[in-house]
Amino acid sequence: MTELDKILQLLKKGDRRGLELLFNHFYKPLVFYAMNFLAQQEEAEDAVQEVFIKFWEGKRFHAIKNSLRPYLYQSVRNYCLNLLQGKKVVLTESIGSGMDMAENEYLDESEWNTRIDQLYKAIDRLPDRTREIFKRIVLDGKRHKEVAEEFEISVTTVKTLLARALAVLRAELNEKTYSILLLFV
């Protein structure tokens, strides 16, 4: 039984620990995913929190038979699109790429984990400084300026190293695995 199966079991029993584990497992990746649709990180965070609240209060976990991952990503996507529709925002290219990436959320658990492992191994092979800057921005969610100050380099250098990291990862990873990375960028 996978960790996500255990979380789903706890949720179906009404155990709040299940919600806590679910939140810890999915919150950050879902926020990054929501940022493909929404311009502001705060909006993305609010959207994900709202999805979690509705998921728990509406006891929507009872309807899930297989995997939590596709359900949560689809819920976040729908919530974000509804928000944008309410604002009457004209959707651009980023939404199209977000739609393409949604296919990744339907990978089964073992394939998803395999791709995530490939992604982290490729990140670990980046040159030291490039890897650290990449991790600070993409995985830790820091701003370019914060990272530049931390490493005592210019913002331009941070952007250049990040672009290099993405280029190396794009060349090294297959398209589906690379598109998972785009959920976090």
Image (cartoon, rainbow, N blue to C red):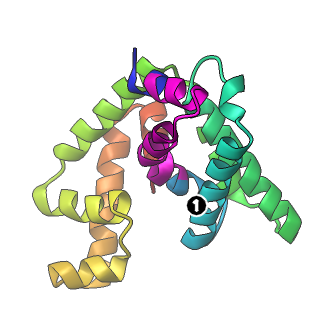
Q: At 56% from the left edge and 32% from the top edge, which residue is drawn? A: 11
Return the residue at label 1.
Answer: 35
- Report the side of 116 relative to 54 (left or right): left
Q: At 32% from the left edge and 38% from the top edge, which residue is drawn? A: 119
99 vs 29, nearest the viewer: 29
* Residue 71 against residue 85 in the figure, above or below: above
Q: At 13% from the left edge and 54% from the top edge, which residue is drawn? A: 127
68 vs 92, nearest the viewer: 68
Residue 16 position, x and y percent, is 51, 41
Magenta region's main secondary structure? helix
- Report the side of 90 relative to 136 (left or right): right
User: Does the magenta segment cover residue 43?
Assistant: no
Residue 47 position, x and y percent, is 66, 59
Q: What element does badge 1 sit on?
A: loop
Q: Given the current orientation, which residue lies at the most extreme left position? A: 128
Amino acid type assigned to the residue bearing label 1 in the image: Met
User: Is residue 22 shown to the viewer in this render?
Assistant: yes
Q: At 84% from the left edge and 70% from the top edge, which residue is drawn? A: 87
- Quarter of the view holding residue 64: top right
Q: Given the current orientation, which residue lies at the most extreme top position? A: 1
- Quadrant of the drawing holding the N terminus: top left
- Quarter of the view holding residue 129: bottom left
* Residue 174 against residue 26 in the figure, above or below: above
- Report the side of 78 relative to 165 (left or right): right
6 vs 167, nearest the viewer: 6
* Residue 101 against residue 40 in the figure, above or below: above
User: Is residue 103 shown to the viewer in this render?
Assistant: no
Residue range in magenta is 6-30
- Quarter of the view holding residue 157: bottom left
Residue 90 position, x and y percent, is 82, 66
Residue 46 position, x and y percent, is 62, 65
- Quadrant of the drawing holding the C terminus: bottom left
